[in-house]
Structure formats: C-alpha cells, structure tokens
Image (cartoon, rainbow, N blue to C red):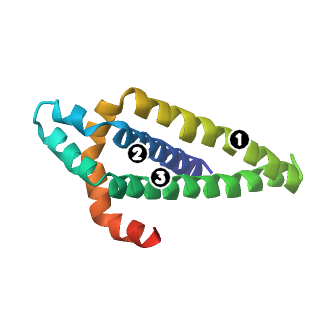
Amino acid sequence: MIVILSVSIVLLVLAGLLISSETAISRISRSRVDDLDQTKASIRLLSVIDDRPRYVNVLLFVSTIASITAFVLVSYHGVNWLTDQGQLPLLGAFAVVAAILVLVSYIGLGVAPRTLGRIHSEKIALASAGPARFLAAVLGPIATLLI
C-alpha cells in the first residue's frame, strides 16, 4: 500500500509539473523570449514556441496519463482498504475516495500548477522546453494520432 501511494504521489507531482509547463509554454510570448539572452534554454524555448500546439498537446497527453494512472491506483487501493478494514460499505468507500481525489485534482492539478505556470511563466517555460522537446520526439506521433 505504501509503495502504491508513493508511486501515486510521484505521478501526481509529475502531472502537476507538466500542467505547470503546459500553462507556461501557452502563456509566454515569442517577443518576450526574443528579448532574453541567447542561451541554450532560450533557443530551445523558441523552437517550442514555433510549434506550440504540438508541445502543449504532448504535455497534456503525458499529464493525463500520469494523473489517471495515479487516480486509478489510489481508487483501487483506497476502496479496498476502506472496505477490508470494515470501516465503510462499498458505496461509502467510493464516496470518500472520490471526494479526496476531487480535492487533489482541483487543487493539485488544477489551481496550483496553472497559477504557478502563469506567475512564473518565463522560468518554467525555459526549464521545461528541453523536456517538452524530448517528450514530443518520443510521444509526438501518438499524441498526433489521438488528435
């Protein structure tokens, strides 16, 4: 149970980082990046901005995989634990797990990462351009097919 919870937390943190990156890349303007010093990170970010939809879609795809996987793991084990302990009937266990996951989703994957992505768009976009390019190279064809 501890291993599953730990994996789920790691997946949710990853999903939050990807959502924050998606928001930052969507928000930052090309003119702002042009004004930055010409570093490897800013050059990578320019290439990402030139094909923004591709990179945003890949980040969305991977964050969806991470968050859904975490939710499935937590749901399965949470409901089993709550019912096996005799603490709640099945419907009550589903309700408790669903309530917890709604809060985690709203705060941890909705409000917080998007707010960070907007407030720190330059830093996050610069830091995430490299990983976004890597993910697009590996998963881009799959994400494109799904669109």
Categorize mark 2 by other alpha carbons within 10 Å: few (<14), some (14-19), many (20+).
many
Residue 86 location, x and y as percent? 87, 50
- Direction front: furthest residue: 31
Q: Earlier in the sequence, mark 2 or mark 1?
A: 2
Residue 27 location, x and y as percent? 37, 37
Residue at point 87%, 48% (across, down): 88
Between the C-alphas of marks 1 and 3, the distance is 19 Å
Q: Amino acid at mark 3?
A: Ser
- Contact check, label 3 and label 2, Cβ < 8 Å: yes
Categorize mark 3 by other alpha carbons within 10 Å: few (<14), some (14-19), many (20+).
many
Q: Amino acid at mark 1?
A: Ile
Residue 64 location, x and y as percent? 51, 55
Numbered circle sitting on residue 22: 2
Residue at point 34%, 65% (across, down): 140
Residue at point 46%, 70% (across, down): 146
Residue at point 12%, 30% (across, down): 37
Q: Earlier in the sequence, mark 3 or mark 2?
A: 2
Report which quarter residue 118 is drawn in. Answer: top left
Q: Secondary structure at mark 3?
A: helix
Categorize mark 1 by other alpha carbons within 10 Å: few (<14), some (14-19), many (20+).
few
Numbered circle sitting on residue 63: 3
According to the picture, the residue beneath numbered tag 1 turns out to be 100
Q: Earlier in the sequence, mark 1 or mark 3?
A: 3
Residue 66 location, x and y as percent? 50, 54
- Direction top: furthest residue: 119
Q: Amino acid at mark 2?
A: Glu
